[in-house]
Image (cartoon, grey):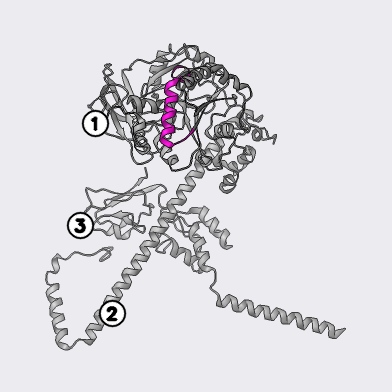
Amino acid sequence: MWIGIAIAVVTITGIALAAGLVLGFISRRLPGNSGDLVERVNELLPQTQCAQCGYPGCRPYATAIVDDSAPVNLCPPGGDETVRRLAALLGREPLPVATSASPASPGCVAVIDESLCIGCSWCRDACPVDAITGAHHFMHTVIASECTGCELCVARCPVDCIAMAAAR
Amino acid sequence: MSNEAVSAAATFDLGKLNGGLRLPGEKEQSTSRAIQLVPVPAQLVLPLTQHSGNSAQPVVGIGEKVLKGQLIADSDGVLSAPVHASSSGKVVAIEPWPVSRRYGDPAPCIIIECDGLDEAVEVAEPVVAYGSLPPDTLLQKILQGGIVGLGGAVFPTAQKLMQASTLPLEYLLLNGVECEPYISCDDMLLREQPLEVLKGAQILMYALGIEKCYVAVESDKPDALHKAADVLAELKDERIVLKPVPTIYPSGGEDQLVQLITNREVPSGGLPTDVGCLVQNVGTAAAVYRWICESEPLISRVTTVTGDGVAMPMNVLARIGTTVADVVAFAGGYTDRAKQLIIGGQMMGKSVTTDRVPVVKATNCILVMSHVVPPLDERPCIRCGECAVVCPVVLQPQELYWFACADDEVKLREHGLTDCIECGCCDLVCPSHIPLMAGFRQAKARIRELADEKARAERARRRFEARTMRREIEEQKRDEELAEQKRAAITAGPREIQEMVERSKQKKRPVAHTKKGPGTDRGA
């Protein structure tokens, strides 16, 4: 009888070890699904691209979240709702939004006072979604339908001619 | 002939309409008089948005003199319709004015002070027999007439026809079914101008190459049925058939009419064209006839002025832009009991707070009620299921209501909220007086908002990623160039290096005039 038990134990342990090895090998060699996860996290972010989280845009922040190098509560435009959803997706603690910076005013877009614009094109380079157009030394303008209201251009303007206004 | 056509009404050889209600008709009061023409008012107010889609763009200036039928605002983009002056006079303002579409809130309008001469603009193109035009040209011409669906949805007719013209179509359905209790403008139109309606139908059939047309009219409108049948006998057009339908609210809905007449169900989220049908209101057909054969754009319409708050309920032919106050004054003014003004029908109309709103292309009824229904005490749902029984779209309003309360977008979609036609049947039968339709309207708006937001976020994401990629490529190129220069410097001899230093010195000389690039010297 003891021999029977021993055989069973050895067999089961052997199967478990073999399966563990195979699974471990596969999980190391095959590409993980972290790319997929970044995609899903990115989808939950508001895509304002405002960089208030400290990363240059929503996707970089999503990558940092998945790498576990950033907490989920750095997105002011997304607000508590986004934090809650991110926490639910990743199984982390939903913390209150950390950044105290002014949240990008919802529904607002940047408007360039064209009579003051000197055509320095700094705002164009600051815009994360290419929503500002204009040639160097000429007047610039905001494509209102594409503006996310991130306010990144406002600070860059050397003549303070950009203001935030309620979208139409 | 006419008697035969009408007597066929008894059998109702029709498909099955789900749910619906038999509402008490209130049409007698407004159908006892003939359609009367409202005189030219002192002032016309023509909103730029009288259709679904983009606002029309004004093409006249303030102070400009305009003539009746003149184009004053042109369509903007594909989904839009032009606006024409409905009498002669002077443009005095282009400014916000209360409109019924926004429940009495202001929207941009062109305001014309009439000179009372009612002078018509000279027709640029002579009237030609439409049969000599290719269908495409005909559709283009309809586009310029400012014609929109007069049943209430005011979708630009030309756009609807163009979308349909690429599809195989079997039936044209002319919708003369006014299931709302008070409205009778289509009834009166069929009684007095059946020829225009039916000739309009012929034009539409020609433009789309449809070989069969059903004119749907409720069986409790014997006069309209008789008149239409008489004219049909004169026209000798066998392709057009008169179809009496039972009076059940909301059988006049587009999808419901298709189901009733052809027994085909329009798929969820689809259009009648998906099942080979095109539905047009009878008023729209008459407007198409007047534009194509008489060169008169859509500048007037038949409107019902009724309710026990009006002295002489009747149907009037009003110029688009006449204010409701003028129309009501023409109909004998308000009675002492007038309490509430509704633009549209009792079930689906919009209550407005001011009678300064103008009659627009969508205004099929001006209803003045003597009593305001107080909101009844809302009680908890008792799950009786009455709402599901009457729903013409076979939804489960009681379940939708829970999902709407919970703001559960996914479940709302799954349960077909977007197919709700907002007929209000569920409200009417609910024993707990739950305002179901109001909840659905709100939920629909919320879903639309979320979808818009999502689309915007998606666009922003793509633009951001495209920009990131572009920057990477630029950086890579710069690195390569630098590496190239470095290699050149390494392989170069001392003489070349000396030359290079000289060149760079020359370049640097006018240093006071160089511009600082972006990102340099920030925070100073």
Q: Around disc 2, counting alpha carbons within 10 Å, would you say few (fewer than 14), some (14 to 19), or many (20 or more)?
A: few
Does residue B13 appear left or right of residue A152 in this picture? right
Tell me the quadrant of the picture where the N terminus of chain B can be found.
top right
Q: Chain of mark 1?
A: B
The residue most toward the right is A1
Of badges 2 and 3, the one in the foreground is: 2
Q: Chain of mark 3?
A: A
Real-space CA distance between mark 2 and mark 3, rounded to the nearest whole angstrom = 31 Å
Real-space CA distance between mark 1 and mark 2, rounded to the nearest whole angstrom = 62 Å
Residue that mark 1 sits on: B61
Precedes in sequence: disc 1 or disc 2:
1
Q: Around disc 3, counting alpha carbons within 10 Å, would you say few (fewer than 14), some (14 to 19), or many (20 or more)?
A: few
Q: Which residues are magenta?
A: B189-211
Q: Around disc 1, counting alpha carbons within 10 Å, would you say few (fewer than 14), some (14 to 19), or many (20 or more)?
A: some
Real-space CA distance between mark 3 and mark 1, rounded to the nearest whole angstrom = 35 Å
Residue that mark 2 sits on: B483
Residue that mark 3 sits on: A137
Q: Residue at x 64, y 79 (%)?
A: A22
Q: Is residue B504 above or below residue B296?
A: below
Does residue B127 appear left or right of residue B8 in this picture? left
- The residue closer to the viewer here, B261 or B54, is B261
- Report the predominant secondary structure element of the magenta stretch: helix
Residue B12 numbered tag:
none
